[in-house]
Structure formats: C-alpha cells, structure tokens
Amino acid sequence: MGTLQENLEKLAALAIRVGLNLQPGQEIIATAPIEAVDFVRLLAEKAYGQGASLFTVIYGDNQLSRKRLSLAPEEGLDRAPAWLYEGMAKAFREGAARLAVSGNDPKALEGLPPERIGRAQQAQNRAYKPALEAITEFVTNWTIVPFAHPGWAKAVFPGLPVEEAVDRLWQAIFQATRVDTPDPVAAWEAHNRSLHQKVAYLNERRFSALHFQGPGTDLVVGLAEGHLWQGGATPTKKGLLCNPNLPTEEVFTAPHRERVEGVVRASRPLALAGQLVEGIWARFEKGYAVEVGAKKGEEVLLKVLSTDEGARRLGEVALVAADNPIARTGLVFYDTLFDENAASHIAFGQAYAENLEGRPTGEEFLRRGGNESLVHIDWMIGSMEMQVDGILQDGTRVPLMREGLWVI
C-alpha cells in the first residue's frame, strides 16, 4: 500500500506525467485551495523534475469568500477578476498547461443568502468564459487532480475526527486514481485502452439517441449531428494526449440541445457554489428543462440555471459503469470530480467542441446541436438500477447498459 507520503508522491507524479503529459519547457498555471499548499509544492517539485519552465499557482480561500459574500455591497457581487481569466486564457492559447487541484469544503458557504451566492457565481462564470473556452476547445493540455481538503473529508466521513477523516479520504483518493496499484502509470495505460475501446464502439454505431430508464427517470437524449464520443486520454488541438480528469471512468459526448425529452432524477448529491444540492429532478421538452427542482439547495440551483438560456439545456451526456473503483468505495464524495465518475451523468450548460467532428465553433457549432452557456453543471443519474439503450436512426434499440453495467 505504501505510506501516505509515498502515495502522495505517486499521485503528484501521476498528475504531471499522465494527467498533464507535461512537455519539457512547458509552463504550468495551477489553481488550488489554500489548504493544499504542501501538496501544490509537491506537484511543483514533480513538474520541475519533468522539465517545467515555470509553475504559477493561484489559491482560493473559502474564508475570504465568506467575508465577501457576507460584507460586500450588492453591486460588488457583480464583479469578478476578468483581467485574471483573460490572462489565463492568453497563456493557455500560447501553450501553458492547466492544472487544477480539486477538493473543497462542500458546505463552505452554508448559511449565506443563496441570492448573493448565485449572483457572485454568475459574475464568476461570465468572467471565466475566455479561460473556459480555451479549456473546452483543448487548445492546451490540462488535468484536475484531487486533494483531501479537511472540510471535504468531514463531509464524507462526518462521524470521524478530522485527522482520521482526512486519512480515510486520501485512501479513497488513492484507490479511485489507481495510485494504490503496483504501477499506477501502467494501470492508467490499461484503463485508457478500455475506455478507448468503448469510445470506438460507440462512434462506429452512430446512435441517434440514448434512452435512460431507472427510478424516477425515463429520458431520451438525442445526440448532436456528427457527435463524437470521448473518454480517457484526449488529444489537444496540437495532438498532445492528456487525461483531463484524475480520476475518470466516463465516456461522454454532446447531446443535441433541442432533442432531449422526458423526466430524470439525480442518484447522488451535487456540490454547487459552496452548497449541497440534493434530490435534483428535471422535465425536458424539446431540449429545454421546463421544470427543475431539488429537495435541498433548490434556490442556489435555480439561480445558477438562470445565468442564460443555455443553462437549462444539456451540454454533455456520459456513460459510466456502476462497478468502477470510485463506486466500489461505497462513498458519496460530495465532489463532482468523483461523484460524476461514480455514475452515468448529464450536464446542464456548455457543450464541448471536442465532442463534435471538426471541433466547430460559432454558427456551425449551434447548427449541429451544440449548446452554449456560461455554466457547465454535471449531475449524476446512474445507478445499479439504470438501463441504457442506444437508438439507431431507424429506431432499432441496442442495449448498452443493464443494471448500471456495460453489456457491449
């Protein structure tokens, strides 16, 4: 199993070598919660050892966010550092790699007015658009790597002392990222091959739609014209392979923004804008979520979905086997990076150009059915009770998943 420090070393090396596939002389721009400073230093050490020319980090601070949301004047909530994100976008387009250290307290902003949280989140989404577009277009290599934030650990293991909860969360992270295997790099090479085989099958069949059936779910998701499935290691525009998410278990593609019909219910909670949203449900007509609700956190969810017209349409649909290493932990992680990879999911908002042949932009992107929005919100709908069929152009149905497991 190795010691905690040995496994942290392996995770940091995995993030740089397999996640980013960092090239000699390349710059890295990292973001991280301030609590992750020691792990970030370890990542920087591995990056420089791999030949990085410069490692720049931007830290986030939940306590600072609470002070702003509590004390800032109303009009101040409409501000965000656009200058910073424009600079990041420029750096990405010039070849800098993007490294995001994920892991936060999902309850960090609980008790604050949802209207103020939503308003600040909208401003953030608008300002971040240039950087988000560079990432979704894969102009550079990028990855997300987890960190066992104490607040996150307490959410996952509420009955344990903080130190023990953090240790348990790290062990779950090592399992989910295959760091607990004898050779994590080789394990990821094999995992990528498996995902690429499923991608090849789905791209060959050219399904017109997917049909999800499960508890509270009867949803038909039409797929965009010339859609492409992706999963595992993904090439950038320059042809450099990177693994955008550590961990990842999904194969995903672009829905047609006007061809989604039916009802769907979430199978796992969602951490959104510092609050937990539980029991999400939606009803779609002609691609638009005409009704959306949640048992908990509904006000924040609806505020974020009011960002723009595209926020209530789908930008991603993903298939995930329900017996993967993340699901096998038996944990609800309250973190989208993990929970989305524990179950099949859909996403409100922005579609990825990589999921359309030729990576179209502008009018061509829209004509093919791609969705545009300032938000991208993954939420989990899969479980061991989910059935998924692919529907061909002539209406023929092909079983893809039964009881949450692949049958192809």
Image (tube, grey):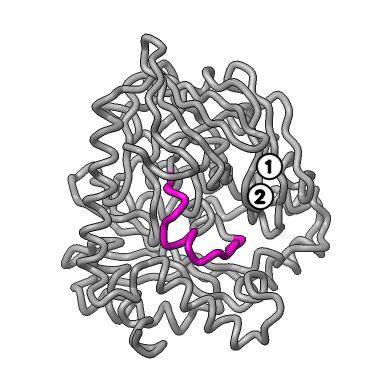
Percent coordinates x, y for residue 279 in the rendering: 72, 46
Mark 1 vs mark 2: which is more N-terminal? 2
Disc 1 residue type (three-letter): Val
Percent coordinates x, y for residue 42 in the rendering: 36, 82
Q: Quadrant of residue 348?
A: top right
The residue that mark 2 highlights is: 121
User: Which one is in front, 130 or 7?
Assistant: 7
Q: Residues within 10 Å of mark 2 (few under 14, many from 20)?
A: many
Q: Are marks 1 and 2 in contact (CB under 8 Å)?
A: yes
> Which secondary structure type mostly characterizes the magenta part of the structure?
loop
User: Mark 2: which secondary structure?
Assistant: helix
The residue that mark 1 highlights is: 304
Instruction: Give the Cα separation between the discs numbered 1 and 2.
Output: 7 Å
State which mark lies toward you, 1 or 2.
Answer: 1
Residue 34 numbered tag: none
At 42% from the left edge and 54% from the top edge, which residue is drawn?
A: 87
At 25% from the left edge and 77% from the top edge, which residue is drawn?
A: 182
Query: Which residues are drawn in magenta?
Result: 320-334
Vertical position of residue 225 compared to residue 17: above or below: above
Which residue, as the protein is rendered here, is positioned at the far top? 394
Percent coordinates x, y for residue 26 in the rendering: 22, 64
Vertical position of residue 46 compared to residue 208: above or below: below
Q: Quadrant of residue 175?
A: bottom left
User: Mark 1: which secondary structure?
Assistant: helix
Q: Residues within 10 Å of mark 1 (few under 14, many from 20)?
A: many
User: Which one is in front, 246 or 57?
Assistant: 246
